[in-house]
Image (cartoon, grey):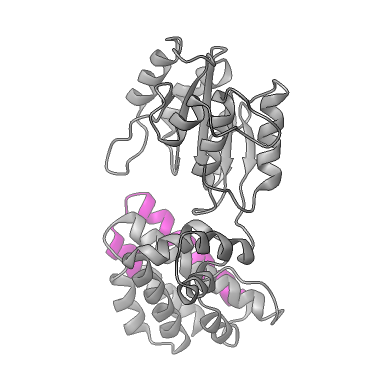
Amino acid sequence: MKRIYGNDHLLTTLSNMVINDRAAHSLLIYGEKGCGKKLIAKYYTELLLCEHPSENGPCGNCIACRNVEKNIHPDVIFPERSGKLGGYSVDTARDIISDAFIKPNNNSGKKIYIFSDCHNIDTRTQNTLLKIVEEPPDYAYFIFTAEAKTEFLPTIISRCVCLGAYTASQEDAEAALAEEDFKPEDIRRAIGCFHGNIGLCREYLSDENLRKQVDLTKSLADSIIRKDEYTLNVLLSSAGSERNEVRAVLTMLDKLIRDAAVLSEDKGAGLIGCDRRSAEKLSGLLTGGQAFRMHRHIEKAWAAIEANAGIPLALTALCAELAAAVS
């Protein structure tokens, strides 16, 4: 399978769990978007089904490994998504519970359910899954991936082995992208925006929409620097009409503001935002208190959107609050 960068300790932990017959039946892998959570979930799945697992991971050559890699293994199930937000419904959870009591057909005698990208997973769905996650059949395994453990109820978290996934070093990100034949100058530009986050670097190089969102974030920062409330409002209104689009832009803007606060204290600090130049300019404008207030305003706007407030209204309110924070 594709090499996984930046998570050697996590991969070793998973391998040792399997070869020592201590594999977790309920596993939660969490970390920021693009850090390789789904790839790690596939790695663990291959380990569980592999005919010859070792401390170095799955063999990659047996029939089970090859079928998992091709996404055609009959006993690796990806639960159905539904609804406007593409989440997991209570009905889906009930179907999975019923299916979990049907024994698998493969030689390893295991059956694996992968719930990926569990952002804002419904509380009712979690409560429905609670019993099967706590006491699954001996052959059943449940893998969840999410950006944060806090997406889940404490009762679910307490019944899962929770492992954090992390981004790679910039050197590893460069090596990973070079393996995919991206041009060196494109790789440098992507890493300048997303650092060691290989998934987002790859998306930046292949998805024009993400590149536009990066440019929009830089323009938003510039309008804040110039204290141009009108342009800030116009730009925010162009962030998109879908939640995922708005979330991506607000997340990148929030990271720039975080970087500005860090740079105001340490000019050589490592950054996480998409544009060092914008962060440096913001650091000369914002105090730590102003940066914190802007962060809270962005959090508040996103919470309102998730609670079904109208996106235009929430972004207009955010514009006024950001402008007031720097006035």
- Above or below residue 71? Residue 283 is below
**Residue 119 lies in the magenta-colored region:** no
Give the tally of numbered discs.
0
Q: Is residue 142 left or right of residue 242?
A: right
Q: Nearer the viewer, residue 223 or 327?
A: 223
Where residue 105 sits: x, y (%)? 44, 12
Where residue 49 sits: x, y (%)? 54, 24
Residue visible at 64% across and 35% down in the picture: 57
Q: Nearer the viewer, residue 1 or 326?
A: 1
- Above or below residue 279? Residue 10 is above
Where residue 195 sits: x, y (%)? 56, 67
- Above or below residue 327? Residue 157 is above
Outermost residue on the bottom side: it is 226
Where residue 202 sits: x, y (%)? 45, 61
- Report if residue 277 is visible in the image: yes
Residue visible at 62% across and 58% down in the picture: 168
How would you classify the magenta stretch by its main secondary structure?
Answer: helix
Residue visible at 57% across and 15% down in the picture: 135
Residue span colored magenta: 289-316
**Residue 309 lies in the magenta-colored region:** yes
- Report if residue 196 is visible in the image: no
Q: Is residue 173 left or right of residue 199?
A: right
